[in-house]
Amino acid sequence: MMKLEKNMNLAATFIAAILFITACGQNKPTSTKENMTQSSQSDQSKQSVGNIDTATFGAGCFWCVEAVFQRLNGVLSVKSGYSGGNVKNPSYKEVCNGSTGHAEVCQIIFDKNKIHYDELLEVFWKTHDPTTMNSQGNDFGTQYRSVIFYHHLDQKQLAEKYKSELNAAKVYDNPIVTEIAPLTNYYPAEDYHQNYFNQNGSEGYCKFVIQPKVEKFEKVFKQKLKH
């Protein structure tokens, strides 16, 4: 398995060449507060409206994913939540037990005038290991699987194309196992999960897991960051 920094450097070289297409750790809080609202399915899967679109990615702990995508210019909001399972309004505790089938995800609202979906995919694949099944680092379980939940056909086609080309080029030591599936549900995570790194940067998981990931990301994507 490739280390994150090696993944970033190798993937950067290859993905840059195909951009012509369009251009949680064990020390998490133990609160069992349940989220009580679900975005409607029609909102989840609708086509993009004007210049605003939505992407939904799972790449391990959603605290890490949120911290990375929040920093991209053109990203309007990032909200952590749960998708892909069969239990309505799941709690964090239920998802962590692996009994719901949900993955920890982030739903990303972005301005297509400033950043394209393929650029989000580039960040997605460079900032986690998409070759490990149901794990990222020391986080293990189906809730940590690598997954792209697409909102419309264009996203599906682009995600599948990238995955196929990355595998064909053998950018990673092992095949990419990222799941690509339609978004059928999304449940916002509990309030204490939202904006987590920005509000809890001094905590152990943030300092030793999220911060190094963010720092590597900022070096690679410095031209795409918010100012």
Image (spheres, helix red, strand yellow):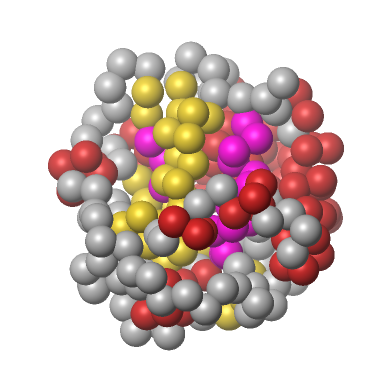
**Residue in the picture at 73% in, 54% down:** 201
- Residue 165 in view: no
117 in the magenta segment: no
Residue 87, located in which quarter of the rendered image?
bottom left
Look at the image and tell me in which quarter the C terminus lies.
top right
Pick the residue in front: 57 or 7. Answer: 57
Q: Quadrant of residue 209 in the image?
A: bottom right
Left or right, residue 195 beside residue 151 = right
**At which x and y percent is residue 75?**
53, 30
Please determine whether, in this image, residue 168 is positioned above or below residue 224.
Answer: below
Image-based side of 148 in relation to 152, left or right? right
Magenta part of the chain: 54-72
Q: Is residue 151 left or right of residue 40?
A: right
Quarter of the figure with the N terminus: bottom right
* Residue at image coords 16%, 42%: 42
Identify the residue at horizontal 34%, vertical 84% (top origin).
99
